[in-house]
Image (cartoon, coloured by chain):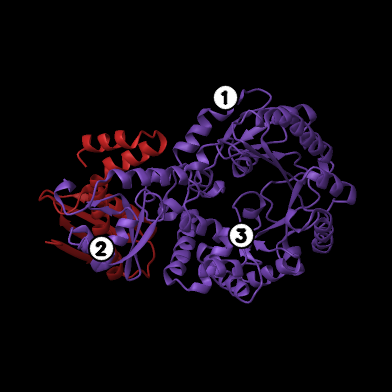
Chain colours: A red, B purple
Amino acid sequence: MKEKNKLKEEKKLIIKFDASLYDKVAVLKTCYIFQDRCHTKTETEKNSSIKVILTPKKESADLQQIENQFWDELIDQQVRYENDNLFSDIRRLIVEQAFRPVSFADLKNKIKKHAI
Amino acid sequence: MQSEKPYLLFPYRFMRFNEDVLLVNEAGEFIFLSEDDFARLLSYQLETNSETFLNLKSKHIVTNSDPTLPIYLLATKYRTKKSFLNDFTALHIFIVTLRCNQKCRYCQASSEDETKTEFDMDLYTAKKCVDMVFKSPSPTIKIEFQGGEPLLNFEIVKYIVQYSEKLNKIHHKRLEFVICTNLLAIDEQILRYLEGHNIWISTSLDGPKDIHDANRITRKGSGTYDIISKNIKLAKEKLGNHRVDALMVTTKNNVSQLNKVIDEYLKQGFCSIFIRTLHPFGRATKEKLGYDVETFFENYKKALTYIIQLNLDGVTISEQYATIILTKILTPFPVGFVDLQSPAGTGIGCAVYGFNGDVFVSDEARMLAKMGDHRFLMGNVRRNSYEEIFKGTVTQEAIENSCVESLPQCSECAFQVYCGADPVRNYYGQNDLIGHRPTSEFHQLNFLVIRHLMELIKENNQDIMNVFWSWITNRSIDEIKGLNRG
């Protein structure tokens, strides 16, 4: 389920969704990015859903457009979050090898140790 | 667990890019994918013999074989991209005086009257500064004289040059000098000295007479265009065209007339221009010479189009801001531009020595101190050791808070490898070293310019790409075309 409930009030967009679909990190990063166009407020609700309240900074803001952008960004942020978890070991190995290089054979062993 | 999948994904950052998705790896190599292919990539449904997969493999974004080699190669490329960190501080800016014979409307330096010699660097301080400079481990030392107007304290400039040359007989560094001068006080004798010591000139030219004289005026209020035009010519005759450069500042007076500024640069014999934004320090804020980011960007785009067309018409001129970013996008190499690197060049790439021996992490930090805030004062050459100044908490904080790899929003941005952070601008504009990306003009502008250049790269118009490569490699378009023909 993409969206449990959505209320559009005057100059305010309330988006609710199931917390199990999106990590908190992805939600907060999305809200952070939207701070250029909206004041953002995030709340958790008892029924394990998250409520995001977006209040546009400009009166002329198109709420539908903001909502569409928000969902697109949220999905991208969730992918990035999952990618980061996936990549963290490899990323650390790359940086380590860049600044504290070991031989090819030793690198191979390190990679094996990390079960990549 | 990726090992159970048909291929392994390597670190990349992505961004929706019009109808496609841009993917950039840890070393800045990039590829555009369709939305469908991106979805297939994420769900491990790409055929490993498909062209898309092989292209991604060539960019080290996926592999279906032993990961050691791609990790090894990525690490080597990452090290190259970060190789600006190897040498520590190379650029040392000396504020030899705060006195100036001009009173430009946007002056960041809050200059002092010509008579106020108490704002000159003295001999003892100059010696201490040079001693400090030569403690830098960097094999290259560039000393840049700024002010005020450095020619008003030329005796100290000469002392610094000669003392540096003397010390360099022991240290054997690549020693370079640049004097940033408005050229009002230049004469044949000074030019002979500059020529004899291989000192380059960086002057200021904001455009044709009406534009230049709107902001760049003497203390009595008269325009400076006529005299500096004459002196640019003289300097070029004496030092050679390549040793005289000019910088412009974009204000509300010329932002919509950048083509005229470019034409003026060509008229004066320059073959590059750096379309720079106004920094919000000093008098610039009082005089309200600014503009919003969108206004600058729209005009910058037009100016860039104009410059590209000039090149296609056989006129050689590059835009330096675009060249810096294109080099970052299209080559494996870092660019020695302290404003656009991670971590920022504050203290580790550049240091600024005030007339009284105060050492700052950047010129903007000095402006801030002039406005009463000494947040980025690293120390003083008269009181502090090299270690206290360059390894102190001020430098460390500036570095720690300017790694885009860990800054909010930058950490996942696909443009991260091409961009940078400026903790001083963040602190000044947003009262926080890390800054707030969604409302940062510095961020917005860099993002827009990088995106525009990436759009042009994606279009892959061969003529435009030839122009870009001619800028990056400092070769003529004909040479580039010859290389393309192979």
The amino acid pointed to by label 3 is: Asn
- Report the front residue among B67 and B318: B67
Specify whether B192 is left or right of B410: right
Q: Amino acid at mark 1?
A: Glu
Q: Quarter holding the N terminus of chain B?
A: top left
- Decide: is B183 above or below B137: below
Tell me: B297 left or right of B116.
Answer: left
Residue A13 in sight: no
| Residue B150 % position (x, y) | 78, 44
Is A31 in front, or is B383? B383
Q: Badge 2: how crowded within 10 Å, few (<14), some, or many (20+)?
A: many
The residue tagged 3 is B474
Q: Earlier in the sequence, mark 2 or mark 3?
A: 2
Are the residues tagged 1 and 2 within 8 Å (C-beta)? no
Q: Which label is found at residue B387? A: 1
Chain to which the residue tagged by mark 3 belongs? B
State the separation of the CA atoms marked 3 and 1: 38 Å
Element at label 1 = helix
Residue at x 32% of width, y 47% of height: B70
Q: CA distance from mark 1 to mark 2?
A: 49 Å
Q: CA distance from mark 2 to mark 3?
A: 36 Å
Tell us which disc is closer to us: 1 or 2: 2
Marks 2 & 3 on one chain: yes
Left/right of residue B274 with respect to residue B485 in the rendered view:
right
> As shown in the figure, which amino acid type bears the numbered disc 2?
Phe
Q: For residue B384, say whether it is visible.
A: yes
Subunit of mark 2?
A: B
